[in-house]
Amino acid sequence: MEAPQIDQDTELGALSYGESILRILTNDQINEDIAAVTAGIGAVNTRFGIINSLYYDPRRKRLRAKQAGRGGTGTVMRHKGLRAVVVNSSLPRIGANNPVDPMGVKEAGGKLKRVISQMDPKQLRLSLWGTPVLVEYMDRYHLLPVQNYQYGQHPDSSKVFADVFLERYFEKRMPDGCYLGCNLACAKGAEKVRLSRGPMAGKDVGIDGPEYENIAAVTGMGIFDPQFVMEYNWYCDNYGLDTISMGVTASFLMECYQRGFLTEREVGYPLQWGDADTAFRLLHETALGKGFGRVCGQGVKRAKEWVAKQCSIRIAKPIETVMAELNKFAMEVKGLEFSMYIPKESLAQQGGYGFSLKGPQHDEAWLIFIDQIHNELPTFEMKAQALKWFPLVRTWFNAVGLCKLP
Ligand code: SF4
C-alpha cells in the first residue's frame, strides 16, 4: 500500500513513524496482534541503517523496539522504497505455530527454565543486569574498545557499569524480556527518560536498552556518561542507525583527527575524544546526511578512502602511504565495522571475526568469553574446533528464528 504521509518530524524517525502507522491502522488501539518493521532517515543517509521491530508490550503498556540488521539491512529496505512492513495476526499466541509435540515442547521449556534459574545467578546474572554486565568483564580483561580499540580499559569505565543503569534507569518491578515468558529476560528498558540534547531535547521517551554494544560503542568515542549512552541508544534507534557501526566510524574519525590525518578544516569542527557535544553533532549530521556526517555515514571502509585522499593532497604524499597508516587502526573487515571486543589477545575471536559471513560481527562466533575470560580453549586445536562448532550452533538459532542467549 502507499505509505501514509505524516508530519515531517515523525517521518524521520523509525520509532515515531512505526508508532504512527500502527496507531492509524488500529484506530489508536495498538495491541499485541499487530507489529511493524521500520527503518528511519539514518537508513536513507548512511550505509549502516538497521531495522526496528516494533511490538506492543502489555507489561510496559507501550511499544517496544528491537534492532537488527548489521550490514545495512535498513539501508537496503529504504533504498527499495519500502517504509514499513506491518503484520497483523489473529492466531493465538500459545500454540500458534502448531507444534507436533506440545508436551515435548512444554517439558523442554520447563527443563530450560530450571537450568537458567539455577545457573544465571551464579554466572553473568543477565536476568538482573542485562548485557550491560559485560562492560565490567571487558574492562577487567582489557577488552573494552576504548578510544577506537586503543585501550582495553579506562579509569572512568565504572561510570557505565551495569549497576549504574540498573539503579538510574531500568524498570525493576517486573521481569523483562523480548516476549512474555522468556526464561532469561535480559532485554532491559527504561521509561520516561528526558532527552537533554539534539532535535528532540526536552522530550520524555521510553528506551529499549542499552545493551553492551551500545555502551561499548560510546566508550569507543572516549565517553563514559550513562545519560549520553541512553540518548545515543535512543537516537540511533529512532534514526535507524546501527549503534556499533556508528560508534566505530565516529571513533575511527576521532583517531584520524588525533593522529593528524584529519584536520578541523576538513571536519568543520574539532573532533576530540570524550567530547559529548561533538559526538552528538556528528551523530545527527550522519543521520540527516549533512556536513561531515556525509563522510561518517559511509562507514569506516569508505571514510578511510576519503581521509586518505584528502590527507595525501594536504601533506603531498602518495595515497598508498597514507592508506597504509590508516589501515593500522581502521577497524573493518569485508566493509563491516568490528563489533565491541578487542580481539588481539584471542586467536579464537580473531578467527571468529575473520570467518563470519557478514564480517567482524560477534553473533556467529562469540568466542571471546570462553577463550580469553574462561580460558577454555588453551590449544590451537581447541580454538580451531570451536571455530567450527560455535558458528554452526549460533547460525542454527538464527535460521530457526530463536534467541541464542537463554
Ligand atoms: S534471552 Fe533473548 S529473547 Fe530473552 S530477553 Fe534476552 S534477548 Fe530477548
Image (spheres, rainbow, N blue to C red):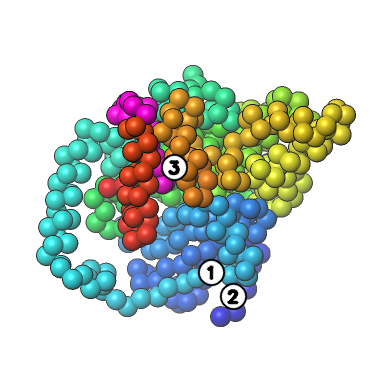
Residue stretch rendered in magenta on the structure: 362-380
Q: Quadrant of residue 368?
A: top left
Residue 179 on image: x %, y %: 31, 58
How many neighbours does mark 3 have within 10 angstroms: few (below 14), some (14-19), or many (20 or more)? some
Earlier in the chain: of badge 1 and badge 2, it is 2
Looking at the picture, tell me which residue is in the foreground, 27 or 367: 367
How many neighbours does mark 1 have within 10 angstroms: few (below 14), some (14-19), or many (20 or more)? many
| Residue located beneath label 2 in the image | 3
C-alpha distance separating marks 3 and 2: 35 Å
On whether ligand 1 comes within 8 Å of the CB at mark 3, the answer is no
Horizontal arrangement in the rendering, residue 102 relative to residue 146 (left or right): left
Horizontal arrangement in the rendering, residue 110 relative to residue 222 (left or right): left
User: Which residue is at a point 20% across and 44% down the rendered structure image?
Assistant: 116
Looking at the picture, tell me which residue is in the foreground, 159 or 362: 362
User: Which residue is at a point 49% across and 36% down the rendered structure image?
Assistant: 340
Earlier in the chain: of badge 3 and badge 2, it is 2
SS for callout 2: loop
Residue 131 on image: x %, y %: 37, 40
- The disc at residue 217 is none
| Residue located beneath label 1 in the image | 84
Q: Are marks 3 and 2 in contact (CB under 8 Å)?
A: no
Q: Quadrant of residue 1?
A: bottom right
Against 135, residue 22 (above or below) is: below
Q: Amino acid at mark 1?
A: Ala
| Residue located beneath label 3 in the image | 362
